[in-house]
Image: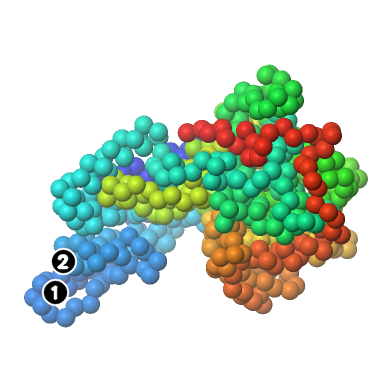
Amino acid sequence: MNAPGASPESAPELPALPALSAAFGAMPTEPLREFMQWMATSPEFSKLYFRFLGDSAALWRACIEREAGKPFTPPAVPGADDRRFASPEWTGSPYFDFLRQYYLIYAGFVNDSVEAASLPAHEKGQLRFFARQYIDAVSPANFAATNPEALKAALATNGETLRQGIEQFVHDAARGRISTVDESAFEIGRNIAITPGAVVYQNALIQLIQYAPSTPTVHRRPLLMVPPCINKFYILDLSPENSFVRYAVEQGHTVFMVSWRNPAQESPPPAGGAARRRRPPAGDRLDRATWDDYVEKGAMAAIRAAQEISGEPLINALGFCVGGTILSSALAVLAARGERPAASLTLLATLLDFSDTGEIGLFIDEKSVEAREAMLGGGGLLAGSELARVFSALRDNDLIWSYVVNNYLKGRKPAAFDILYWNADSTNLPGPMYAWYLRNMYLENALRDPGRLKICGEKVDLGAIGLPSYVVGTREDHIVPWKSAYQSVHLLAGRGRGRSAGPPGRFVLGASGHIAGIINPAAKNRRSYWLGGETPASAEGWLAKAKEHPGSWWGNWNAWLAPLGGDSRPAPVSLGSAAHPVLEPAPGSYVKVRVD
């Protein structure tokens, strides 16, 4: 099936395929093979094809009527959220209007064919993904000769926009990735990740930052944040107006932050004199680090340091994305050892139950995991750029093709946006840790079953953590589907395991996606969130009774956490402690290591 205006030779390579292959192993070809066989033999496909021909003929007649000045109704119109054809140039010209509508008719034909194909559910999901990648790639908006906005700009500037676009393409090709943000506008420690604080603990895997108080009194119990190790920690400390860290500090919390070391380097970079004395041996290598290392040397080490520095036996703990999975694993290990170091647990867009992992899960099976284990299980690194391309492919129109059009066809420079700067700052992962995570979490979903998984030598049970929990999912999350995030409330409460349920959890559903739904500053009061009382077994049942509230969920979270923070006490006049002196100013040196 060739798209309008593009042949298989001229169509751009589907961006998801090499990225998915690198991240998860050999790409499945069975769905495509079965789909081709179905097209060759199915009467249903023949009906769809003849309907497509009829729709194309109707479009041609409508265009003739338009040229003759007769009233006409466009046979195809883009969806309300499709910004590719929003410019009036698309409808002002009969030629480009024809291209636009023909493409939409063709896209509908491809989608209808995929839905009609007789394939198992899992393979049908893979086929839907491939079809979307193909349809998005061959859009006439992605080609200079068929994009009226790009042609208009080129004519208006005597070809200068095309020259600038080619220059930008050459620059990006040399780096191996599409520019999505003006990176010159940001510098870590200058205008991003600038909440005052200091590194007060360091090992081969993490630096621990303690942030300076901004209120005269603080809650007695500190708040430890464990961000995802797939990305840098400063998603929680962006520019000041978007900083979740700054907000928490302003509410009187003593905040500690884990900063994961980028495995690209053999040993951590030198910091100040004290940091040099505490620098890990040069032989420490993270290309062989395991999930147990991330739990014990990461989350558990940070918990102990926060306890020792604050002098408090209990802390409040917060995890984001895979950081929440690591943190929950650590608390379950400690519970198995009879230790209960936390007063509460907040999970932001985190998976503990991997039953539904969205489109990512479509490409994780026994064969692909075995391929990752063979390649990376004994050592090596998974490049962060590969994972970044996978996540971009999940929203290819927003995170790939819009920048192809903007940068290369229109010759514009990307805007300065702190979240996109963070998104382009990728982090490598150790092969053994990544391969273990794929098998035990994504493939076998073993963490949810009490005693099935052994971490750090202990059989873990999430229900044994026994903490009040605040769980946030986001409605349009393409990485952590919100219904899967919802299940964490029940896993942490230990329901249905032959014992009384643990402390009740609160589930909050934020608007927007994986990042924008979490980084929704209270001061801006944008978007909305849904809040319910009871948490029934069904996520749909919860949503049916939940009420929508305007603005950010941050204020609701702080009101929930404040009583769990303990009594107020005077804010500390210095950071760290005698056993954990200040090593260097925040944001530290680990976060500044970049890879492309």
* x and y, in percent, of residue 562 in the image: 78, 62
Camera-nearest residue between 594 and 138: 594
Q: Is residue 78 visible?
A: yes
Q: How many marks?
A: 2
Q: Mark 2 to mark 1: distance in Å?
A: 8 Å
Q: Secondary structure at mark 1?
A: helix
Q: In the rendered structure, which amino acid carries the disc numbered 1?
A: Arg
Q: Is residue 592 left or right of residue 59?
A: right
Query: Which one is earlier in the sequence, the residue at label 2 or at label 1?
Result: 1
Camera-nearest residue between 118 and 202: 202
Q: Which mark is residue 11?
A: none
Q: Is residue 565 left or right of residue 226?
A: right
Which residue is drawn at the image coordinates 73% and 51% (left, top)?
A: 213
Residue furthest to the right in view is 338
Q: Secondary structure at mark 2?
A: helix
Which residue is drawn at the image coordinates 22% and 41% (left, top)?
A: 163
Q: In the rendered structure, which amino acid carries the disc numbered 2?
A: Pro
Camera-nearest residue between 162 and 392: 162
Q: Quadrant of residue 379?
A: top right
Color style of the picture? rainbow
* x and y, in percent, of residue 276 in the image: 70, 23
* 90 lies above or below 411: below
Q: Which mark is residue 66?
A: 1
Q: Is residue 173 left or right of residue 466?
A: left
Residue tagged by mark 2?
Answer: 94
Which residue is drawn at the image coordinates 41% and 45% (left, top)?
A: 182
Residues at marks 2 and 1 touching, judged by CB atoms closer than 8 Å: yes
Residue furthest to the bottom in view is 71
* x and y, in percent, of residue 93 in the image: 16, 65
Q: Is residue 49 visible?
A: no
* x and y, in percent, of residue 151 in the image: 19, 53
Which residue is drawn at the image coordinates 28% and 55% (left, top)?
A: 141
